[in-house]
Image: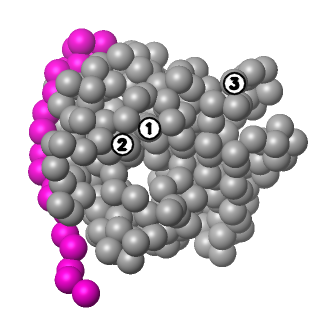
């Protein structure tokens, strides 16, 4: 069987909402053609997903094995450190502007640049930790724009729990949700011990009670890229499986 290899390149777009240039990593699948429509997967922490998560190579492998359909992947970059916190955290000073970037600037770019399926069911958001929080926030705020979500060990606080309970559009969403069984005592970079497992279980209980197109997975592992990388395969299979 021939070896498939998609194309990865960098591009920068201007965000009116953030008033800054946003670097993107773009993955085009093997045999990409402008004559064909593709679904779009948008990843927070883009460089980390491409490098540490091996997102492009994982997609290549699964496409070659005929496990998933082809898709375009867009990885969003940030300046790391405080910039990530300012944009991703619900109390970050750039958070609201970042959500507007996600809902306004980025979809406009995607629709102008690529031949894609309609927004909603044709667009999936992928995120880990705070990136998972941002993806969930965008999904329940704009379900007709982002109809599919992959949440890997998302940061879950009380306000997002309140908001998912009041959300009325679950019929518009397909959602894959995972967290590690060892994430009850995760030591963050600031030295604090955080429990990611319990709030994610609470979130999952609510989702399971709703009964929409939802898959929950507690994997053997912790809040680490090595674990999220392995868990990408079942996530992509759930969202894009043939």
- Is residue 78 shown to the viewer in this render? no
Along the horizontal axis of the image, is 34 left or right of 185?
Answer: left
Compared with residue 163, is residue 17 higher up or lower down, i.e. above or below? above
Residue designated by label 2: 40
Please report the residue visible at 66 percent of the width from the left and 70 percent of the height from the top. 219
Residue 169's disc is 3
Along the horizontal axis of the image, is 190 left or right of 77?
Answer: right
Compared with residue 117, is residue 190 higher up or lower down, i.e. above or below? below
The alpha-carbon separation of the residues under discs 1 and 3 comes to 16 Å
Is residue 68 covered in magenta? Answer: no
The earlier-in-sequence mark between 2 and 3 is 2
**In which quadrant will I find the N terminus?**
bottom left
Q: Are marks 1 and 2 in contact (CB under 8 Å)?
A: yes
Residue designated by label 1: 122
In what element is the residue under mark 2? Answer: strand
Where residue 106 sits, quadrant-wise, is top left
The earlier-in-sequence mark between 1 and 3 is 1
The earlier-in-sequence mark between 1 and 2 is 2
Query: How many neighbours does mark 1 have within 10 angstroms: few (below 14), some (14-19), or many (20 or more)?
Result: some
Please report the residue visible at 24 percent of the width from the left and 12 percent of the height from the top. 16
Image coordinates for residue 166, horizontal then vertical, percent = 78, 20
Image coordinates for residue 122, horizontal then vertical, percent = 44, 38
- The residue at the far bottom in this view is 1
């Amino acid at each position: 069987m021939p070896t498939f290899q998609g194309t990865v390149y960098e591009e920068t777009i201007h965000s009116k909402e953030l008033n800054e240039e946003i670097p993107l990593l773009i993955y085009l699948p093997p045999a990409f053609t402008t004559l064909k429509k593709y679904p779009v997967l948008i990843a927070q922490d883009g460089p980390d997903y491409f490098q540490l998560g091996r997102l492009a190579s994982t997609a290549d492998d699964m496409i070659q094995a005929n496990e998933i359909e082809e898709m375009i992947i867009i990885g969003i970059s940030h300046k790391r450190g405080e910039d990530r916190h300012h944009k991703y955290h619900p109390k970050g000073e750039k958070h609201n502007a970042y959500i507007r970037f996600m809902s306004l600037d980025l979809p406009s770019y995607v629709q102008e640049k690529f031949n894609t399926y309609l927004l909603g069911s044709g667009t999936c958001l992928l995120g880990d930790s705070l990136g998972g929080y941002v993806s969930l926030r965008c999904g329940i705020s704009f379900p007709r724009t982002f109809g599919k979500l992959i949440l890997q060990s998302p940061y879950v606080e009380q306000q997002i729990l309140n908001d998912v309970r009041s959300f009325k559009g679950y019929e518009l969403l397909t959602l894959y949700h995972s967290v590690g069984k060892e994430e009850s005592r995760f030591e963050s970079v600031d030295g604090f011990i955080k429990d990611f497992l319990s709030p994610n279980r609470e979130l999952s209980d609510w989702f399971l009670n709703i009964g929409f197109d939802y898959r929950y997975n507690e994997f053997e592992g912790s809040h680490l890229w090595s674990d999220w990388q392995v868990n990408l395969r079942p996530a992509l299979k759930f969202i894009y499986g043939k």
